[in-house]
């Protein structure tokens, strides 16, 4: 019998012990390097964060918005997964810690990186659905598209929008993001 080398499984503590130079996510015990975001990626993230934050502030809502890098341990019982969504909206402040968030955010937005789109469209999509994220948006700067997954209503097929559309935020009855306004800022 030939011995099989065991692959090392990393934990959340290993994630927190990485150096500040390393930009990684930990998914099921495996580290994934994250490429530095493009200027366009960052501009979209900033515009969305401002819009969401202003809406929450105006409504005196209980939710808080965080932009990456912000560690999200999707499940407190799983110490092998911690991600850094581009934008996280958390409405249960009991999930917030000094280190980030423990538990599924209500709304996650990922802005697709050209270096690894499958990470957002497949790997994270499944993680977020299983963790109980209510709403998941995938914003693709190159295709100028937005895929909206309404996990709260068990919708696994996205509603597709372009950067010319207004996109209703399903977890808020009176909030929509006008991507044509964001497109002007790019």
Image: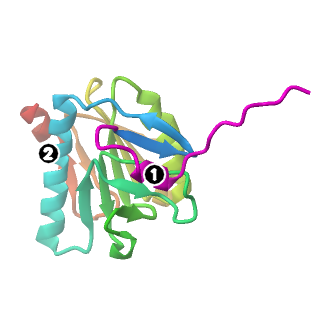
Q: Residues within 10 Å of mark 1 (few under 14, many from 20)?
A: many
Judged from the image, the secondary structure of the residue bearing numbered disc 1 is loop
Question: Quick one: 25 or 18, which is closer to the camera?
Answer: 18
Judged from the image, the secondary structure of the residue bearing numbered disc 2 is helix
Confirm whether residue 155 shows in the render: no
Question: Quick one: 79 or 112, which is closer to the camera?
Answer: 79
Disc 2 from disc 1: Cα separation: 25 Å
- Specify the quadrant that holds the C terminus: top left
Confirm whether residue 93 shows in the render: yes
**Residue occupying the point 19% across, 48% down:** 48
Place of residue 83 in the rendered image (x, y in percent of width and height, measured from the top left) = 42, 48
- Specify the quadrant that holds the N terminus: top right
Which disc, if any, is residue 47? 2
Identify the magenta region: 1-22
Question: Quick one: 101 or 146, which is closer to the camera?
Answer: 101
**Residue occupying the point 39% across, 45% down:** 18
Question: Quick one: 105 or 173, which is closer to the camera?
Answer: 105
Snapshot quadrant of residue 97: bottom left
Say above or below: 152 vs 184: below
Say above or below: 16 vs 26: below
């Amino acid at each position: 019998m030939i011995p099989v080398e065991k692959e090392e499984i990393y934990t959340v503590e290993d994630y927190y012990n990485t150096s500040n130079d390393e930009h990684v996510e930990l998914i099921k015990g495996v580290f994934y390097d994250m490429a530095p975001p493009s200027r366009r990626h960052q501009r979209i993230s900033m515009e969305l964060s401002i819009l969401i934050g202003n809406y929450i502030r105006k409504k005196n809502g209980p939710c808080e918005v965080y932009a990456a890098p912000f560690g999200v341990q999707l499940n407190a019982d799983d110490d092998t997964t911690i991600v850094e969504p581009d934008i996280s909206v958390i409405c249960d402040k009991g999930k917030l810690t000094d280190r980030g968030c423990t538990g599924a955010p209500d709304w996650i937005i990922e802005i697709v990186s050209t270096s690894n789109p499958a990470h957002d469209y497949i790997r994270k999509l499944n993680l977020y659905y299983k963790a109980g994220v209510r709403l998941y948006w995938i914003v693709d700067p190159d295709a100028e598209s937005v895929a909206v997954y309404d996990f709260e209503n068990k919708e696994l097929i996205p509603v597709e929008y372009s950067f010319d559309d207004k996109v209703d935020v399903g977890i808020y009855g009176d909030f929509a993001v006008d991507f044509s306004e964001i497109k002007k800022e790019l």
